[in-house]
Amino acid sequence: DGGITQSPKYLFRKEGQNVTLSCEQNLNHDAMYWYRQDPGQGLRLIYYSQIVNDFQKGDIAEGYSVSREKKESFPLTVTSAQKNPTAFYLCATASRPSTDTQYFGPGTRLTVL
Amino acid sequence: AQTVTQSQPEMSVQEAETVTLSCTYDTSESNYYLFWYKQPPSRQMILVIRQEAYKQQNATENRFSVNFQKAAKSFSLKISDSQLGDTAMYFCAFRIGGRGSTLGRLYFGRGTQLTVWP
């Protein structure tokens, strides 16, 4: 079954804890992206990666970290430094970032207790 | 800076009717792409339609079409023969094309919640 998978679907975190959101793809796409969605707002870019072992900060990178050790995987860690992490997180991929359409995974809902 | 504005937070339409969602954008770039995504209650983001800025012809996908006015920086989405399954949040998005530091990032509007009623 091809596509983009995100896990878990729902995640609960206590204040002060780090959590990692998974994003995996088997589309052989080069570029991967993390977006955050809050009610009443569009999606905001957290981090993005065009190739393995390389990534760049987006507009709201503070309190987040990523890695890109494999082409298929782009995990996002929400650290305790992120002051308001409760949100819906979407991962996206694109075959060629300069010209191709981005496709999205099903998302992870993170709630801080 | 690139900005995308959707001025209609909510809209509703009766089944089988036509509805148009508005989007304007601001950029100094000449090579770019525009998109409409829909997000149904499942929250899965689904591509509806895509438009390359260098193409004068408006994109169409079955019941969905756009009115791309490059000089006015306007990119509206028309949904014909609306169906109950079209109920969703619709997002307009913009991306700079070609090489450069932007690396294909999307800029999103805040969305328009469309409700289709029987």
Image (spheres, coloured by chain):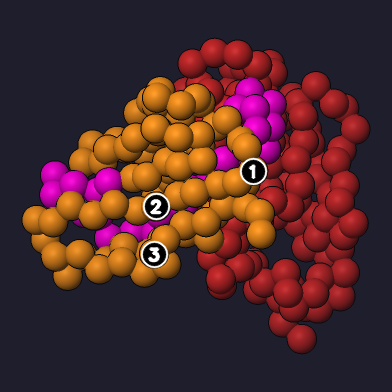
In the image, residue A84 lies in the stretch drawn in magenta? yes
Which residue is denoted by mark 1 in the rendering? A27
Amino acid type indicated by mark 3: Pro
Q: Which residues are magenta?
A: A77-102
Label pair 3/2, CB-CB below 8 angstroms: yes
Q: Residue at x 50, y 25 (%)?
A: A51
Disc 3 is attached to a residue of which chain? A
Residue at (46% x, 57% y) in the render: A6
Q: Which residue is mark 3?
A: A8
Q: At x 86% / y 75%, what residue is drawn?
A: B16
The answer to whether residue B19 shows anywhere in this view is yes
Residue A107 shown left or right of residue B86 in the figure: left
Image quarter where the C terminus of chain B lies is bottom right
In the rendered view, would you say B109 is above or below B114? above
Q: Earlier in the sequence, mark 3 or mark 2?
A: 3
Q: Colour of chain A?
A: orange
Mark 1 or mark 2: whose residue is earlier in sequence:
2
Type of the residue with mark 2 = Ser
